[in-house]
Amino acid sequence: MIHGKKEAEVVLRLDGISKRFGALKANDGVSFVLRRGEVVALLGENGAGKTTLMNILFGHYVADEGSVEAFGQPLPPGNPRAALAAGVGMVHQHFTLAGNLTVLENIRLGTEGLWSRSASGARAKVERLSRDFGLSVHPDAKVGRLSVGERQRVEILKALYRDARVLILDEPTAVLTPQESEALFATLRKATALGLSVIFISHKLHEVLAIADRCVVLRHGRVVGELDTQTTDKRALAALMVGGELSLPRAEAREPGAVLMRLDAVHTPDRGASPGLKAVTLDLRAGQITGLAGVSGNGQAALAEIVGGLALPQAGRIMLKGTPVARWSPAEALARGVARIPEDRHHQGSIADFDLTENAALEGYRTRFSRHGWMNWRAAREFAEGIIDRYDVRCPGPETRIRLLSGGNMQKLILGRAMAPGPEVILANQPVRGLDVGAIAYVQSQLIAARDRGAAVLLISEDLDEIMGLSDVMHVLSEGRLSPGFARGTMTAADLGLWMAGQKFEGAHAA
Amino acid sequence: MRLEPIANPSPARRLGLPVLALVATLGVAMLLALVAGANPLAVLGQIATGALGSKLAILETLNRATPLIFTGLAVAVAFRAKLWNIGAEAQLYAGAILAVVLGTGLLGSPWVLPVSALAAMFAGAALLLGPVLLKTRLGVDEVVTTLLLNFIMLLLVSYLLEGPMKDPMGMGWPKSTPLIPEARLPRIVEGLRLHWGFALAILAAVVVWVIQTRTTLGFEIGAVGQSPEAARFAGMPVNRVLVKTALLSGGLAALAGWSEVAGLKGHLSSDLSPGFGYTGIIVAMLALLHPLGVVVTAIFVAGIFVGSDAMSRAAGVPTYIADMLLAVALLFMVLAILLTKVRVVRG
């Protein structure tokens, strides 16, 4: 069967694509082909050049060298419409749907003129497509009411409606529960059986192995391997991606200590589509990593704001070491020994045009790097140098603007800044998202070290492997509701998936 | 055509483009002179000599630069926090009014000068307090409120000059009672027209520079301007920083009006400022919001105004050319700054 696909017609050919941004070679002579009816996974760490390559394919960037051919015809560079017209459709990580329009309206939006085709014809086509591909979604439902998984189906339908023969999916499972991912894979199998071809961009190895026929691995902008998924395994792929063997740290179980922070029946208001917290009671214990699993947009942001001092509960209490806090703000949280590693390191954790010294001084400028309103820049600089040194931040020096650092190095600086005062409670919100494997291992080992030192760590992540590998106790957040705590090793990914989908909560409440 | 960001602009790009902008401005100036029917090179020469050609010309330029340094600093301080204070003109008049209120006999030597300067700063600060509180509390756009306050203040000044402040000896002219001699800023060198307001403006620039680079407030202002979200996350009191910035900015702008009245004019009239508040925006932008740079660009801008006056008398080209030149210079400079950060790519 694999052999048969190898013989199939080539639908997309990328030939020697190179793209340079200043000193950085984002793509360096990348070539591969996509055949009819196959799924090719594009695998690589963040910054490996996957997104640049897809932007070139889609005409958002113009390649310095190389050419793209679709169905035997060269695609003119720099023209997004040409890719669409040639039958290449892309589903982005962030959806491009209008929430106040219906599914059908969204699909037709931008595809056809106002009078070009009758609505009934469009409806018939959408219904046929959703039947053929197993993309069940009601054409008249308002998109704003749909779940994330359903919205993704609308995006795929939109591409199919435009007669896409090639589907590019950018990290499609990042926002899905394991069960929803399975449904997506079923759709993709139907699509390839019908002769479509798929490029599947991901860095989750088990998914790549589950869905792809072939796998193209990118590293530093170059193709470092092209593997048949039948004959390879996770370990080999990971080694190719990173360029060497690497094992992620796993935390050993430990005896938990006293409760350092407690959220007591905390409520927060709903905000648009994202639900607020519903009577969340959560204990963060010394010497324990508490993992919080769940698809993002289920109240994680609200919980992180409460713990980090950015918001106050609408009802309920925040307690530190058994006493309710009277005042609560970011400065107060810092003063009370709560360290925060924010979800958005670019907009919350750092200031792009500030240098490393200034960014390192952001949280402690009042207490440690100034006296009577006068900044002590020498102390701040020494502090920054200390972090650069201890946390191996790769940079030309403390006077470098932080925008020039890679995500991993930026995160190391934020981590070093948070850890410096010896915090008792550590909020780590998606601490390794977008980092390369080396940086992931480092950040995670630091969290484990902090736990072993006696800190209470709250780890919020969408990555179940990360949660299950690091957490001493796991909770699931679904639509603002918090599941009971599950001890290490008592739950499988599928069990957690049921909680993430919210199915278990009804039973728990009845009990 | 699209814009592609440049990660690390080369020094040639960072220095060359502003120079190119200046050259292009001169080119446009010559073109304008040609349109006006004069010899382009002669016009440029006359502007230069008019601004810097004699001791008198230089002092006149520095005198004209004084209010521009104050308003330029006011704008630079506010814009750094991304607080869009378009109302330096109003704050300037607030300072001028206080100079008259306290300087016409209410206070005597030696208190009148320092007290009226401080009072002027308070008045300017108070005038910006309303817009900034509306912004932080209710999210009202400060561009609109500060801009509109300019017109309110101008009307208030007209009213005062026709009514309570009108000079009884003014032969019906809309101007205020003159300041008593003790309330006047002395000249730096006896016999030369340059007054101490200029020295005070330089001092203000240095003070602002020290605040921005050495104090926690300066650090906070920069952080709030660059990223209010990150500043809030780091525990900075974002709204309080905005209020402090507004007080500083309003106070600086008020000193422009105060020093014009106490140093140069000796009385208040409704034509005290030919738009110093608005020109301050150009001064600050040309200086890339750097407080010491403001001194340089204020003198440059003042030179163009003073030089154009002289040129106009000699060559018969309208003085409006000065306004056009500044507008063109600003546009080219903004473009040059943009092009140091991005390059234009075809396709």
Image (spheres, rainbow, N blue to C red):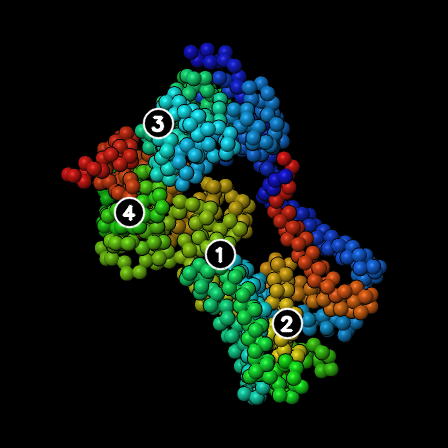
Task: Name the mark on residue B223.
Answer: 1
The chain carrying label 1 is B
Q: Of tags 4 and 2, which is closer to the observer?
A: 2
Q: Earlier in the sequence, mark 2 or mark 1?
A: 1
Instruction: Tell me whether marks 4 and 1 sit on the same chain.
Output: no
Between residue A66 and residue A113, name the one nearer to us.
A113
Identify the residue position indicated by label 3 in the image.
A136
Q: Quadrant of the C terminus of chain A?
A: top left
Left or right placement of residue A179 versus residue A41 in this view: left
Tell whether label 2 touches label 4 (CB within 8 Å).
no
Within the image, what quadrant is residue A107 found in?
Answer: top left
Of the two numbered discs 3 and 1 in the rendering, the one whose residue sits closer to the viewer = 3
Label 2: which secondary element? loop
Whether the residues at callouts 3 and 4 have beta carbons within 8 Å, the answer is no
| Quadrant in the picture for residue B41 | bottom right
Measured in 3D between alpha carbons, the distance from the residue under mark 4 to the one under mark 1, in whole angstroms, is 31 Å
Q: Amino acid at mark 3?
A: Ser
Camera-near label (2 vs 1) is 2
Residue type pointed to by label 4? Leu
**Mark 4 or mark 1, whichever is nearer to me:** 4
Q: Chain of mark 2?
A: B
User: What's the mark number on residue A277?
Assistant: 4
Alpha-carbon span between mark 2 and mark 1 = 33 Å
